Amino acid sequence: MEDQREASREKILVCDNVNRWFGGLHALKSISVSIEQGEIYGLVGPNGSGKTTLVNAITGFYPPQEGTIKFAGKALNDLKPHRVAEQGIARTFQNVALFRGMSVLDNILLGRHIFMRPSALASLFYWWWAQREEIAHRAKAEEIIDLLQLESVRDEPVDVIPLGMQKRVELARALCAEPRFLILDEPMSGMNQEEKEYMVRFILDAHEALGLTVLLIEHHMDVVTAICERVLVLNNGEKIAEDSAHEAIHDPAVIAAYIGKKDDAA
């Protein structure tokens, strides 16, 4: 088991000296980090520390103005978000970003958009051509529904199901894109303890069943220390710690960033 783990430890995502400004705000300050194939990697820090900015840089929403980001050896800097998705990177969002008025199944199917190639010719010959493609997409969606145990709500409007279930639907939509690298932006926010435990289990199930590499942004430190192998801690756009989850969380610089220094308290 250990030999298999070591054999798969090539670097899949490498950020080298990444900088990002928004006007006069230096949001990311020379951030360098590498994430290994197959690991669950945590990204934590106080509000406004640059976590989501780094994710937006990786996914092409706000590319770095200095530095490079490579995924599986390919530079992502100049790629639009949909092109980044085509490389095998999927994400969820801090705030639930589902399509209201649509069913759970239809929301999950939207994760297949990068594989869909609609055309007038395919529509004309639907029964021979487009129907097979549609059946294949639905089969993949049903596979993910089964993995995340969403069968009971598959036909429900997404508006009426609880928040914890909506977060699971968003995870399902991301998984439907068949990613190699999954970014989860605060998947536990707004959840009670029971919902958090369910979500942790489903993340671990998906990680194992689908062979994913996971970048997890999370404020719940119990979750981070429970499932993340390594953790990067940001504060004011700077890297202040990177280590195993337990060591990083107990780093004095990290504690000071979260609760302040003794001098500050005085």
Image (tube, rainbow, N blue to C red):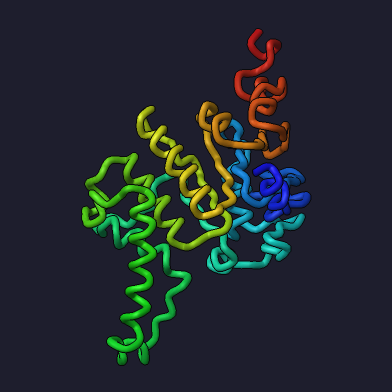
Q: In this view, does 21 lie above or below 196?
A: below
Residue shown at 66% from the left, 37% from the top: 230
- In what quadrant of the picture does the C terminus appear? top right
Residue 44: % across, % down: 60, 35
Q: Residue at x 42, y 67 (%)?
A: 112
- In the picture, measured across the screen, residue 180 lies left or right of residue 167, that is right
Question: Which one is nearer the viewer's eye here, 158 or 115?
Answer: 115
Q: Is 61 placed left or right of 124 in the picture? A: right
Number of on-image labels? 0
Along the viewing direction, whichever of 35 and 142 lies nearer the viewer: 142
> Which quarter of the figure has residue 162?
top left
* Rendered location of residue 18, percent (x, y): 73, 50
Q: Can residue 34 be seen in this view?
A: yes
Above or below: residue 143 compared with residue 217: below
Of the pair 101 and 247, the residue shown nearer to us = 247
- Which quarter of the rendering shows the N terminus? top right
Q: Can residue 61 be seen in this view?
A: no
Task: Identify which residue is drawn at 36% across, 34% down.
Answer: 195
Name the spot of residue 97 as percent of width and height, x first: 39, 52
Residue 210, above or below 236: below
* Corner quadrant of residue 117: bottom left
Up the image or down, 199 lies above or below 56; here it is above
| Residue 233, percent from left and from top | 66, 34
The residue under the point 63% across, 67% down is 79
